[in-house]
Amino acid sequence: MDYQQDNPAVYGLKFEARCMAPRLGEKDSHNFIVGTHSLKEKNEIHVIDFKEETNEVECIGLYSHPGEIWQLQASSCDTDLFASVYTDSKGWHCSAWKLGDGKAGDKDGGEAEEDIQKLKHVGDFKGHEGAISTLKWSVVEEGDEGGEESVVTIDSKRVRWWKLAQGGSIDEGKCLTTPEIKGLTTGCFDPHHDLHFVTGDSRNISTWDFRSAMKPGLAIPRAHQGRILDIDYNPNRPYHLASAGEDMVARFWDLRNPSRPINQLGGHTHWIWQIRFNRYHDQLLLTAGTDSVVNLWSIVSASSAPVGELEGTGSTSEKEGDKRIKKYEDHRDSVYSVAWSSDAWVFASLSYDGTVVVNNVPQSEKYKILL
């Protein structure tokens, strides 16, 4: 059965929520995990699935989870393995978990208590002081199943790199810290170099090589006028990344020439909380913010196939061919998480009031890319 492309699918949780992650190991479905952020109630992990045939989102697994959940990341190899950052009365924690045979509730998240399953605790990512600002899980691409998975956790002063053995056992590879960098806020893996990582600290961007001395390499000082809230690497174009933050702009960088951004975008009236490249068609980009807006962009100037780029202009305004495809205003609260599914054309967004909205890239834009 066909469904209406412009009609979003909505899933509601009972409690507030801040974090969601795609289950990229589920290659043939649109799976996400969502964590709740309630101070008073028992928090939960919802495993949800978007059905294209019916344009509905269903809960296919429901689990209890300790504390308020701040961040989630899922393995791209083991579909049942994920990690979470959470807080309780003892402070901040980061742990790895395994899903079991979860039971489904109804389509609106109104599950009965007897349906809630227990997670299997795999291990902890220890050694942090204070708030854990970032949790990132490396993506092992299809055809590279033998590749080793890594996890990076960040607090305000330290970048910790962890190696995961088969089955989920945790081994800390290296802890990087330097007195010159304080207030680390975000980071991401370099998908083109296994041992490279990039961080945002306040307004600056720094690169790290886990093989080298315990200090950052290349730096982009004052990359933003406000605190950097998210960074994402272009998955198909080496040395190219995007950053976003409290100054309400997204900027695109070539690390080989970091003196000025390639381009920058607005489109938001408050903080841009997340920015995400499409893994298959990197001209497609999502931004989500605390203005309750999700924007879908076509950014050919930052793409690996930059059709329509204005060569040699040096302009940092929106270039010919770059455009906002659609502004989504389906949420009524701050949007803290946005994610592409394992498919190229489906994405989900999560607002603090516990609303998950699943949308599709408009067919007209899809045909432009494919034809």
Image (cartoon, rainbow, N blue to C red):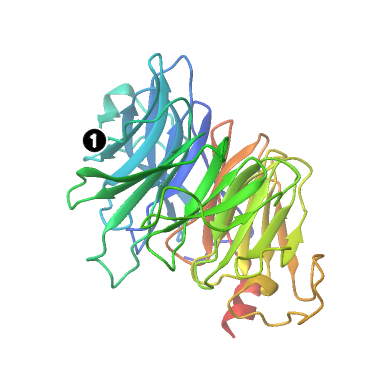
Query: Residue 349, how many percent across, how many down?
Result: 56, 47
Query: Residue 79, how many percent across, how many down?
Result: 28, 52
Report the front residue among 105 and 319: 319
Query: Residue 330, how many percent across, how many down?
Result: 66, 45
- Residue drawn 46% across the image and 61% down it: 190
- Residue drawn 72% across the image and 48% down it: 224
Q: Amino acid at mark 1?
A: Gly
The residue identified by callout 1 is: 123
Q: Is residue 150 left or right of residue 53?
A: left
- Residue drawn 60% across the image and 55% down it: 219
Q: Secondary structure at mark 1?
A: strand
Q: Is residue 11 left or right of residue 81?
A: right
Q: Is residue 97 visible?
A: yes
Local crowd at mark 1 within 10 Å, few (<14), some, or many (≥20)?
Answer: some
The image shows residue 40, relative to residue 306, as above or below, that is above
- Quarter of the image for residue 117 reads top left
Residue furthest bottom as drawn: 371
Residue furthest left as drawn: 167
Query: Residue 103, how many percent across, how many down?
Result: 27, 37
